[in-house]
C-alpha cells in the first residue's frame, strides 16, 4: 500500500469514528439517511390486511423529531385523537435508542443500566422502541427511528415512514376524521405538491442533517449552500403567497414548518447552518409564526424536548451535552401574513 493510500484510508477511518451515525456515513463524508423499513399500507376498502378502523393503531413519536412531528400535526389537524392513540418517547436517546422513561424519575434513575425503569408505554409496556422493531422483524439491524405506526391487533409495526403515515391519515382514515374539511393532499395540485415536497425534503428537511452530520469541510459547505439557496427561493415564493400553495395549508407547509421551527434553536447552532437564522428572513419568519399560531399547532411543539434531544443525544457533535439557554423566540406575535389572503 502506498503512503497516499494509507493516508486516505486513515482519514476515512477517522471520519467514520467521528460520525454521529457511522452506518449512514459515506467514505467521502456525506450523511446518507437509511431507508424506512416498514411500508405496509392501511386501506379503507379492504385492499390490504390493515383496515382503517378506530382504536386499532397506535402512534409512537418523539416531540423532538421533525419527521415524527409532522405526523403529530396531521393527527391533530384531522382530529384523530380519539381514533389513533399516541405515546411520546423520552427526548434523550442514548446507545439503547428511544426509551419510554417516566419523566418523574431523576435522570440518574433513568440512566441506570442495571435496574429497570418505569415504562410510559400504555400499549405494550415497552421500555425501548427497539422492542417494537424486534417483534416486527427479529433480524432488523438498522437505526430505530420515529414515527412508528403500530398495529395492536397483529402486534407489529405497520409503517415507520412519516410520508406514508401522513398520507394514510389524510386518505385512508378520512371517514373517521373529525375535521373533514382539512385536506393535506389536494388532488388538483398533486403533481406540483409532490415536486415541491421532494425539494423541501432534499434541500431543507434532510439538508440540515447533511450539513450537521457530515465529517468533511467541503461536504458541509456544499450542503449549507444548497440549504440556504433553497431558503432564498422559498423566501421569494412566500413574498407573494401566504402559504406555499396560495391560501390553503397543505402537508408540504407542515414538512417545511417542522424544520423552520427547530432551525434557530438547534440547526443554526448545533448543525452549524449559520449563514442566517430564520428570523433574518422576513417572509419565512412571518410564515413560521403564522403556522405556529394555526389551529393550536403550538400545542404540538415542545422546545424543551427539541433542545434536550439534539444537544444531549448527539455526543459526537456536542460531547459536553450542554444545552444552550437561548435563543428567545417570539412566535406569538404579529406576522402580517393575512394581507396575502385569508387562511
Image: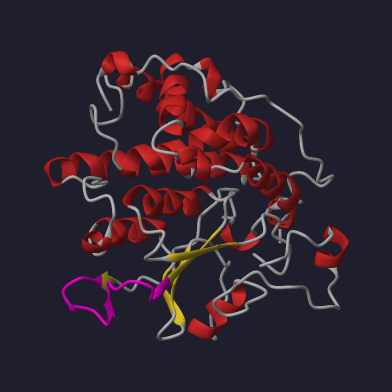
Q: Residue at x 42, y 48 (%)?
A: 73
- Overall secondary structure of the magenta stretch? loop
Q: Residue at x 51, y 45 (%)?
A: 300
Residue 122 location, x and y as percent?
Answer: 58, 74
Residue 342 drawn above or below residue 66: above
In magenta, the rendered stretch is: 43-57
Q: Residue at x 20, y 71 (%)?
A: 44
Residue 312 location, x and y as percent?
Answer: 75, 49
Name the colouring of the figure: secondary structure
- Image quarter of the C terminus: top left
Residue 154 drawn above or below residue 216: below
Residue 167 drawn above or below residue 228: below
Residue 12 location, x and y as percent?
Answer: 68, 54
Question: Which of the 4 image quadrants contains residue 128?
Answer: bottom right
Residue 277 drawn above or below residue 139: above
Q: Residue at x 29, y 54 (%)?
A: 178
Which is more toward the observer, 321 or 78?
Answer: 78
Q: Is residue 168 visible?
A: yes
Q: For this view, does 283 lie left or right of residue 20?
A: left
Question: Which of the 4 image quadrants contains residue 240?
Answer: top left
Which is more toward the observer, 151 or 102?
Answer: 102
Q: How many marks?
A: 0
Question: Which of the 4 image quadrants contains residue 264?
Answer: top right
Q: For this view, does 326 lie left or right of residue 184?
A: right
Residue 141 location, x and y as percent?
Answer: 57, 76
Q: Is residue 240 magenta?
A: no
- Image quarter of the N terminus: bottom right
Which is more toward the observer, 336 or 278?
Answer: 336
Amino acid at each position: 500500500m502506498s503512503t497516499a493510500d494509507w493516508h486516505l484510508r486513515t482519514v476515512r477511518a477517522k471520519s467514520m469514528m467521528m460520525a454521529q451515525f457511522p452506518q449512514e456515513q459515506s467514505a467521502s463524508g456525506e450523511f446518507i439517511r437509511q431507508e424506512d423499513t416498514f411500508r405496509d399500507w392501511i386501506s379503507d376498502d379492504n385492499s390490504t390486511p390493515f383496515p382503517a378502523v378506530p382504536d386499532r393503531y397506535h402512534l409512537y413519536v418523539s416531540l423532538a423529531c421533525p419527521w415524527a412531528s409532522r405526523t403529530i400535526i396531521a393527527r391533530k389537524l384531522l382530529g384523530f385523537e380519539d381514533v389513533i392513540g399516541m405515546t411520546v418517547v423520552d427526548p434523550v436517546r442514548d446507545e439503547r435508542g428511544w426509551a419510554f422513561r417516566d419523566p418523574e424519575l431523576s435522570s440518574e434513575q433513568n440512566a441506570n443500566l442495571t435496574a429497570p425503569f418505569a415504562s410510559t408505554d400504555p400499549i405494550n409496556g415497552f421500555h425501548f422502541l427497539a422492542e417494537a422493531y424486534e417483534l416486527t422483524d427479529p433480524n432488523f439491524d438498522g437505526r430505530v427511528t420515529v414515527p412508528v405506526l403500530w398495529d395492536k391487533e397483529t402486534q407489529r409495526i405497520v409503517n415507520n415512514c412519516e410520508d406514508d403515515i401522513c398520507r394514510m391519515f389524510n386518505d385512508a382514515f378520512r371517514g373517521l376524521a373529525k375535521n373533514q374539511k382539512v385536506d393535506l393532499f389536494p388532488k388538483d395540485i398533486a403533481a406540483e405538491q409532490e415536486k415541491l415536497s421532494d425539494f423541501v425534503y432534499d434541500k431543507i428537511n434532510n439538508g440540515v442533517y447533511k450539513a450537521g452530520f457530515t465529517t468533511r469541510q467541503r461536504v458541509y459547505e456544499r450542503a449549507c449552500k444548497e440549504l440556504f439557496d433553497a431558503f432564498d427561493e422559498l423566501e421569494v415564493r412566500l413574498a407573494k403567497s401566504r402559504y406555499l400553495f396560495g391560501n390553503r395549508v397543505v402537508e408540504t407547509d407542515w414538512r417545511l414548518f417542522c424544520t423552520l421551527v427547530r432551525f434557530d434553536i438547534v440547526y443554526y447552532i448545533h448543525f452549524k447552518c449559520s449563514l442566517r437564522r430564520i428570523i433574518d428572513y422576513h417572509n419565512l419568519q412571518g410564515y413560521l409564526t403564522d403556522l405556529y399560531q394555526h389551529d393550536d399547532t403550538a400545542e404540538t411543539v415542545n422546545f424543551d424536548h427539541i433542545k434536550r434531544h439534539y444537544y444531549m443525544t448527539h455526543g459526537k457533535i456536542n460531547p459536553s451535552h450542554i444545552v444552550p439557554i437561548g435563543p428567545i423566540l417570539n412566535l406569538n406575535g404579529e406576522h402580517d401574513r393575512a394581507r396575502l389572503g385569508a387562511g
